[in-house]
Amino acid sequence: MKNARALSALREALGNAVVTDPESLFRASFDAMKLSFVPEAVILPSDPAGVGTVLKIANEFGVPITPRGAGSTLTGAATPIHGGWVLDLSKLNSIRIDPLNKFAHVQAGAITGDIQKAAEEHKLFYPPDPSSSAFCTIGGNIACNAGGLRGVKYGVTRDYVVAIKGFLANGEPAVWGRALKKFTSGYNVRDLWIGSEG
């Protein structure tokens, strides 16, 4: 294995969140585009701190990382073409609706259709509706700036993301944007992430 020392450090830090069995590796080797590149490991962090740990170790050892939500993309973006590790974000799927401020606080692995249903419970509406909304994740929607049929009237994902909390490549936490209706202080670095897939 090319990155054995890195994988050992990762297992020490995250334990059972690191999987290397052939079936898991195969499932993570392709997305809806059906090109297959087998990774060395799949990591399923159960909290955001685990994402930072993965990125820190990968950065330290020079291991390529491919983030993955539901693998529903038709672009090959969730395919580990450079090998390395697949960072599966499907367990990071919490959804919290703030009806007073009309915000949804969601994690990258949250299913888009579930976000829409959660918003509806508060008489709110999340418009982007890609054809895969029943099973695609909001992280993937952000990466490809998804829209769907309602995009013509209501706009696309970019029009509904006010802030992104994530990590730099070295594992350091970062926030891009602010959960405010209007925020114009400094450069709009948040938009570097929206549509970053292509």
Image (spheres, rainbow, N blue to C red):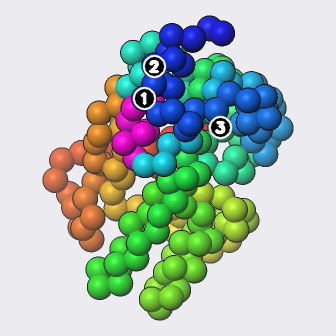
Let me know if residue 39 is in the magenta part.
no
Q: Earlier in the sequence, mark 3 or mark 1?
A: 1
Q: Secondary structure at mark 3?
A: loop
Residue 9, labelled with which disc?
2
Q: Earlier in the sequence, mark 3 or mark 2?
A: 2
**Which of 145/100 is in front?**
100
**Image position of 114 with respect to 142: above or below:** below
User: What x and y, as percent, mark residue 64?
Assistant: 55, 21
Say which residue label 1 marks.
13
Query: Mark 3 belongs to which amino acid?
Result: Ala
Q: Secondary structure at mark 2?
A: helix
Decide: marks 3, 2 in contact (CB < 8 A)?
Answer: no
Question: In the rendered view of the protein, which quadrant contains the N terminus?
Answer: top right
Say which residue label 3 marks.
77
Give the residues drawn in magenta, as a range. Answer: 48-54
Query: Mark 1 belongs to which amino acid?
Result: Ala
